[in-house]
Amino acid sequence: MDEDIALLEDLIRVDSSTSNGNETGVAKILQKKLAEAGITAKLIAYAPGRDNLVAEINPDAPGPVLGFTGHEDVVDPGDPKAWTRGPFDPWIDGDRLYGRGSEDMKPGLAALTLTLIRLKQSGFTHHVRLLATVGEEYGLLGAEQLTKLGYVDDLAGLIVGEGGDNALKWGHGGSYNYRVLSHGRSAHSGNPKNGVNALSKLAQFYLAEQHLFDDVAPNPYIGEFVHSVTMLHGGTQINTIPDTAELRGNARPTPTFTNDQVTARFEGLVNKLNAEGDGTLEFQQIHNIIPVESDPHGKLLTVLRQAVKTERGLDFTPIFTQGATDASAFVKSANKFDVVWYGPTADVGATGHRIDEYVSIARFRHAQKIYEQVARQFFEGSGAKLKLSVDQSDCF
């Protein structure tokens, strides 16, 4: 087995799932691989067992800096017995490499790491920085940390090694997670008037939320504003009026209906309901991930399009998609830079976050070669203007 596949398998063997939080295991594998090629990588701790990694080549080179980024964590595997084999026991069947994280997004991270190594080994003279992050799947934790520490303040462009390889993206929507707590007063169910049922006011919120955004105009690139209540919980005993209840939901902000506007709608509804009758609602924001817009005619997207066409023979029209990535944290830097998204996937559709997730080995190899071409052309080449398209699928 070749070293590229061995690296990817080693990364998949590390259970860096959201509930486990063991990204340090991934970071140390990458650190060792980079050290073997003479590249020093430093670990930046977020929490015990959770380390980001930063590595770069030619840090003293004049001119622009190109960034590579990928996340070390994966979503939880679900029931391990539902997998053909253990989710962290990678296996190969033909062109498919299976295991949790085999598509989202350890192959992109591995391919970016291999690209950094091969650029150095080839005598490449320009400045490239790799940022491997913790906690992308729940809160963009590492990306937020690295942004605050200044690691993107000098970037001219950033390649995010995920988002699929069947399209080119020039931007994506945001993701907004929230909870609403309902406070009432408990009582025996035989005397409900002695209490305040926390479920009642929460139910009012749920029903109002269904039409809270009906007047929001569709975004020209990703269409209707998307919002959903996704979790409900209340009560602890069937014969007791519940004094607390909780609801959680998700909304997808767009460049034309922003995160702040989403907050204003929810808070306005909570205030309105609190002024009506007994009980109190409390609104809390969990995650506030902003949309990202890059330059649809920029050099980075242009050279990515050229590299995909050269390597795979495909000429994709750039699109704007739903979804969220670490880019939402990185673009909070005062420094403005272009972002593109491209990462190896399964051979048919997407399998990330699913049972028996897998990546096409051929597409993994393609991605590494594409990243290398993009790096070279970003510093040395130029490209033509691009035609835009609309896409409403959630590719992330």
Image: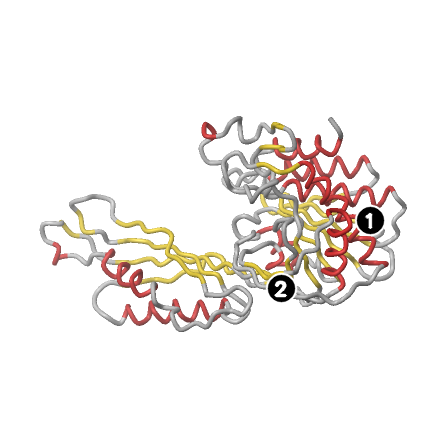
The answer to whether 199 appears left or right of 324 in the picture is left
Whether 13 is drawn above or below 125: the answer is above
The answer to whether 108 appears left or right of 177 in the picture is right
Res 207 seen here: yes
Q: Position of residue 54 (x, y in %)?
A: 72, 48
Residue found at x 54% / y 31%: 87
Place residue 153 in its image quadrant.
bottom right
Q: Position of residue 50 (x, y in %)?
A: 60, 42
Place residue 36 in its image quadrant.
top right
User: In this figure, what is the number of numbered marks?
Assistant: 2
Amino acid type of the residue that numbered disc 2 sits on in the rendered structure: Lys
Q: Position of residue 316 (x, y in %)?
A: 67, 56
Mark toward the start of the polypeptide (1 vs 2): 1
The answer to whether 209 appears left or right of 184 in the picture is right
Mark 1 = which residue?
A: 57
Residue found at x 13% / y 49%: 188
Crowding around mark 1 (Cα neighbors within 10 Å: few <14, some 14 to 19, many 20+) is: many
Amino acid type of the residue that numbered disc 1 sits on in the rendered structure: Ile
Please give the label number shown on residue 20.
Answer: none
The answer to whether 214 appears left or right of 148 in the picture is left
C-alpha gap between disc 1 and disc 2? 24 Å
Mark 2 = which residue?
A: 332
